[in-house]
Image (tube, helix red, strand yellow):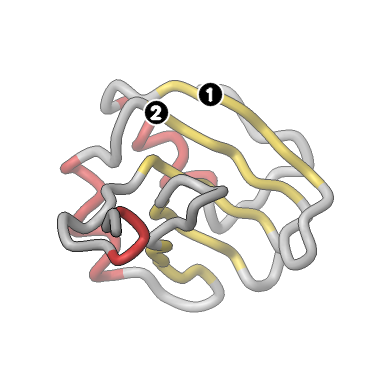
Amino acid sequence: MPKMTRSCEHLEPLLNRALANGCSIVDVSEGWSVACRVVELGPAFPEALRSAAQDIQSPVRYYTAVGSPHNEPDQGFFCDNCKVGIAFPGERPLNNALDKRS
């Protein structure tokens, strides 16, 4: 399995599990205000990781973001020690106020 450059030993098993379950790396970005690096994966959050989201231990945490007019929703894992994240596309809520038309 490919290793992340400036790897995060805490996220490596989750990344490898995602890749083994049909995900691929879509993009890698750096220089965020909180994150040094974010690895974006697709096409979707694999079912095999849903249980991992419940069992995550510090320094890794599971997150969801609902999105905004400028950013798509996403979900994933972030390591607070290494400042590295892995992100998957999320889903917009059906009744999202941002989607309402006047």
Sequence order check: which comes first, mark 2 or mark 1?
1
Please tell me which residue is depicted at 30% across the width and 53% down the height of the picture. Answer: 99
Q: Quadrant of residue 88?
A: top left
- Name the amino acid type tagged 1: Val
Residue matched to label 2: 42
Residue most extreme to the bottom: 58
The reply to whether the C-beta atoms of the residues labelled 2 and 1 are less than 8 Å apart is yes
Give the farthest residue toward the right. 31
The alpha-carbon separation of the residues under discs 2 and 1 comes to 6 Å
**Residue 69's x, y, as percent?**
49, 52
20 vs 99, nearest the viewer:
99
Residue shown at the point (36%, 69%) measured from the top left = 56
From the top left corner, tell me how far across and down residue 42 is, in percent. Answer: 39, 28
Residue nearest the viewer, comparing 65 with 93: 93
Q: Position of residue 61 (x, y in %)?
A: 46, 71
Position of the C terminus by quadrant: bottom left
Q: Which residue is mark 1?
A: 26
